[in-house]
Image (tube, rainbow, N blue to C red):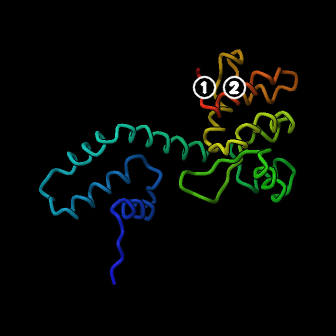
Amino acid sequence: MSIEVSTEELAANTARLLGADGKPGVVDYLKAVFDTVASGSIGEPLLHRVLNAERSDPLAAARARGRRFAVEDYRSPDNLALLDARDYAGRNERTINEQRQKGELYALLQPGKERGFRYPKWQFDADPVRLTAVLGPFASAKANCWVIHSFMRSKREELDGHSPAEVILHPHAELGPVLDLAKQEVSGEQGA
């Protein structure tokens, strides 16, 4: 009995076994190696094949940078595992999970993973009504957690050089401009 596995799956599994699945370019490199071996053209320089693979997908480097950023940011001490979030916020795990599911909090998840949420610490210091109002458009659009996180942390001219998170945390700051930016973000009009 033979099991068909694509070279991409083999590369991803090998990278995971080596503990290198979050490192940029590893899966692409291993896929090129496995493709070379499978094709029998081992005489062709491997580096040339890897470079050609990157040229055929000009966004590969950008995706790799994005994955690297996500993995590094995910591990930041400012992003709390559920038990740490529970202790910091003084809420039980069930409540935190329910708030995430309702769009009252957001949590980060490593690309390609389904477990291991990390909660950005700042949101537990925010007024829940203000935070939920800004998260609303993202929750309705079922936005990716990294889109939300990038939005919350990016300083904006429209907010006098502050990030949406900073405005949310300031109890007397006008929330309207942040809500407008959130709606624009989910409708794809950021910068329009």
Q: Residues within 10 Å of mark 1 (few under 14, many from 20)?
A: few
| Position of residue 181 measured from the top left corner of the image (x, y, whole percent) | 69, 25
Relative to 173, is 32 on the left or the right? left
Mark carried by residue 181: 2
Q: Nearer the viewer, residue 180 or 66?
A: 180
Q: Quadrant of residue 124?
A: top right
Q: Residue at x 74, y 55 (%)?
A: 82
Amino acid type, mark 2 = Leu
Q: Residue at x 45, y 61 (%)?
A: 16
Q: Residues within 10 Å of mark 2 (few under 14, many from 20)?
A: many
| Separation of residues labelled 2 and 1 (CA atoms) | 7 Å
| Position of residue 147 measured from the top left corner of the image (x, y, whole percent) | 61, 38
Q: Residue at x 45, y 39 (%)?
A: 65
Query: Upstream in the sequence, badge 2 or badge 1?
Result: 2
- Residue that badge 1 annotates: 190
Q: Residue at x 83, y 20 (%)?
A: 174
Q: Quadrant of residue 58?
A: top left
Tell me, yes or no, whether the two marked residues, 2 and 1, touch with CB atoms within 8 Å: yes
Determine the secondary structure under disc 2: helix
In the image, farthest residue toward the front: 187
Q: Is residue 61 above or below residue 82?
A: above
